Amino acid sequence: MEQVFTLTFLTGLLAAMMRMATPIIFGTLGEILAERSGVLNLGIEGIMLMGAMTGFLTTLSTGSLWLGVAAAAFTGIILSLLMALLAVWLGLSQHVSGIGITLFSTGLAMFIYRLAVGSPTNPPTVQPFTRTAVPLLSSIPVVGEAFFTQYSLVYIA
């Protein structure tokens, strides 16, 4: 049996971990901001799903990745304002309104996606961002490939 944990595998694993952690980092930053203002936002999962759907459909229809990112961020802002309105202004339970936003957004995102795309055998795809290499740092053997040859959103996060 060949050795599984080769240097190439570990480099790819580190790079994939950085890429996959990016949306979670953005969601965590939003949740930290909400909690610092005194709101427990349990609707973060639904907000992220709604933003992902909006961003994907915007990118699919316009072809602009940055416009898709802006649409996803705008959707997150609107739903976070709805959460703040329910919890702060109306004085509803933060737990109930957060779970309600999660359930509502999850169902609505799936419904809108099915309306826009349907249920094709091959789902539509968009071109991803191009990788950006940091000069000098990207040439470091393992760390350079994993951490300094990433997409621009990874660096922003």
Image: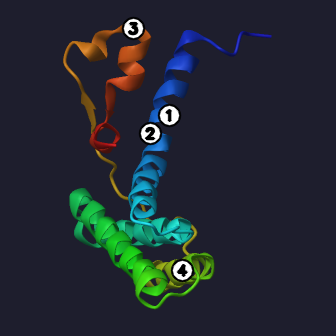
Q: State yes or no: discs 4 and 1 in contact (Cβ < 8 Å).
A: no
Instruction: Report helix, strand or loop for mark 1.
Output: helix
Q: Nearer the viewer, mark 4 or mark 2?
A: 4
Vertical relation: 118 (above or below) 155: below
Vertical relation: 44 (above or below) 82: above
Vertical relation: 141 (above or below) 145: above
| Colour option used | rainbow
Which residue is tagged 1? 16
Q: Which amino acid does the dot numbered 2 rest on?
A: Arg
Q: Nearer the viewer, mark 4 or mark 3?
A: 4
Q: CA distance from mark 4 to mark 1?
A: 30 Å
Q: Quadrant of the C terminus?
A: top left
Instruction: Report helix, strand or loop for mark 4.
Output: helix
Q: Which amino acid does the dot numbered 4 rest on?
A: Ile
Q: State yes or no: discs 3 and 2 in contact (Cβ < 8 Å).
A: no
| 10 Å crowding of disc 3: few (<14), some (14-19), many (20+) | few
What is the number of the mark on residue 79?
none
Q: Nearer the viewer, mark 4 or mark 1?
A: 4
Q: Which amino acid does the dot numbered 1 rest on?
A: Ala
Q: CA distance from mark 1 to mark 3?
A: 16 Å
Q: State yes or no: discs 1 and 2 in contact (Cβ < 8 Å).
A: yes
Residue ID at (30%, 71%): 58
Which residue is tagged 4? 101
Q: Is residue 152 left or right of residue 40?
A: left
Q: CA distance from mark 3 to mark 2?
A: 19 Å
Q: Quadrant of the N terminus?
A: top right
| 10 Å crowding of disc 1: few (<14), some (14-19), many (20+) | some
Which residue is tagged 3? 141
